[in-house]
Image: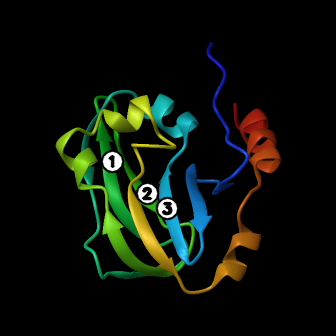
Amino acid sequence: MEETTIPHDVRYTREHEWVRIDGDTATIGITDYAQRQLGDVVFIELPDAGDDVGQMDEIGVIESVKAASDYFSPISGAVKEVNSAIAEEPAVINKDPYGEGWLVRISVTDDSELHDLLTDEEYKAFLDTDE
């Protein structure tokens, strides 16, 4: 089996979302592991720009040929931007989950919440115990 990609510059949730912080903006997506588990993504439900979200609030649904799964915000804030390109071509999530397959960008309201998230080493160890 192909090894799961786990970048070092992001934080992770136990529900398999990732967040990358750039200033006061958090870019959020699902992990490589999550997209592999889902299989071919065929539909993505995105939140609306301007929506306020709390840490671990459900913010949308990803549907694949196998299942539909909710996804959650790893951090609190207001939705600044959604990746409308993946609404048109959801398979991008399978091809590039940490790049072009990002889901939403949020204005961070409390960066201390990052301490509640997993580092890349912690996420790898979590996956090793989960499999």
Q: Mark 2 highlights which residue? A: 71
Picture disc at residue 27: 3
Residue that appears at 43% across and 57% down? 71
Q: Earlier in the sequence, mark 2 or mark 3?
A: 3
Secondary structure of the residue carrying numbered label 3: strand
Quadrant in which the N terminus appears: top right
Pointers 1 and 2 in contact (C-beta within 8 Å): yes
Quadrant in which the C terminus appears: top right
Q: Nearer the viewer, mark 2 or mark 3?
A: 3
Residue that appears at 37% across and 67% down? 59
Give the class, few, some or many, for how many residues have Cα within 10 Å of label 1's Cα (few <14, many ≥20): many
C-alpha separation, residue under disc 2 versus residue under disc 3:
14 Å
Q: Mark 1 highlights which residue? A: 62
Q: Earlier in the sequence, mark 3 or mark 1?
A: 3
Q: Residue furthest left?
A: 88
Q: Amino acid at mark 2?
A: Tyr
Q: Horizontal placement of 115 versus 97: left or right?
A: right
Q: Horizontal placement of 100 versus 47: left or right?
A: right
Q: Amino acid at mark 1?
A: Ile
C-alpha separation, residue under disc 1 versus residue under disc 2:
7 Å
C-alpha separation, residue under disc 3 versus residue under disc 1:
17 Å
Residue that appears at 71% across and 64% down? 117
Q: Amino acid at mark 3?
A: Thr
